[in-house]
Image: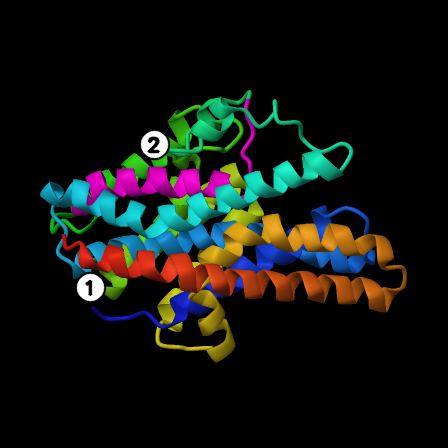
Amino acid sequence: MKQVNIIDSLRSFAAISVCLFHFICTTIGLEYPSIMTSVANYGQHGVLVFFVISGFIIPWSMYQKKYKLTSLFRFMAKRLIRLEPPYLASIVLVLLIALIKTKFLIGAESPEEISAARVGLHFGYLINFFPQYKWLNNVYWTLAIEFQYYLIMSLLFLLFIHKQLAIRLLAYGLCFAMAYLVPDASHSHFPSYAPLFLFGIGVFQYQNNRVGMLEFAGVMVACFIYNYLFMGIPAAGFGLATAMVILFFSDTRIPVLDWLGKMSYSIYLIHPVIGAAVINILSRYAHGAAQKLGVLVAGLIVTFISSYLMYLLIEKPSKKLSSKLKL
């Protein structure tokens, strides 16, 4: 299967961006210069980069492996085998840390707030359908979006690669229709982000010669306009920029980012659990600018080390197991 070299570097960029946003803008006890927080605030849009990457890489993989509708259950099983073990491991970490907090820290969530129902709804990524409950880890909401995307793509994929223009137009129309017509004021479900994922799908189509330049350009313009009007400038800007990077720099490798990108999923899951906890603990001892910067660096280092361990022990084996299941 042909590799797209830039993908891991993009994943690394997105994961680190989200890390910096959470570490600088949402952790307690430290105040950074306003210009630093203003720049780091853009890091929250790293999730938009992840969505466009998935928009590209999922149909790319399905196309390379000659996906058919009869492969739907195997496809979903492959995705679950790939993603569930690190996700479940991170949930265990969250619960362990919450237990420690309730024993030793005042003001932490009580065991009643971490109920069996709340934990159970994390299986199947169902929290978004029950607003009375919160995610145990505030990055999990994006995994729910991704899971819904896999379900939709497993049904619509063959429309996007169809030889007839009318069928492909139908697929584009379904993306925009579900985004516009499905009520989702909080933007917590896939339909709101369908035109963002479509940026990546469009690049996949063009790079695999399924569509011509005119159709590709039309899809990019339509996605940009919709996201600009209904999701805001960041969605339109980051979406188009990510699509163009994949298109024009697909063979590029950035060594450090490429290496970190391979464990970007673990970084994404662990940083709000372990990295942020380290920063919150150390922040009480940081007073000067240099000490604050040191705390930030310590949080990143601990995140990368713990993520690498999770990658070796859990994520990498789940990747291998998933690859053994053929479509």
* Res. 132 visible in picture: yes
State the CA–CA distance, disc 2 to disc 1: 26 Å
| Disc 1: CA contacts within 10 A as few (<14), some (14-19) or many (>=20) | few
Question: Up-down: is 78 above or below 7?
Answer: above
Horizontal side, residue 174 vs residue 186: left or right: left
**Span colored in magenta:** 133-159
For disc 1, the marked residue is 209
Q: Residue at x 50, y 33 (%)?
A: 187
Residue at the disc numbered 2: 177
- The kind of secondary structure element at disc 1 is loop
Question: Residue 268 at what x, y percent from top left?
Answer: 52, 54
Horizontal side, residue 43 vs residue 131: left or right: right
Q: Earlier in the sequence, mark 2 or mark 1?
A: 2
Magenta stretch encompasses residue 278: no
Which amino acid, mark 2?
A: Ala
* Residue 4 spot, x, y in % from top left: 32, 69
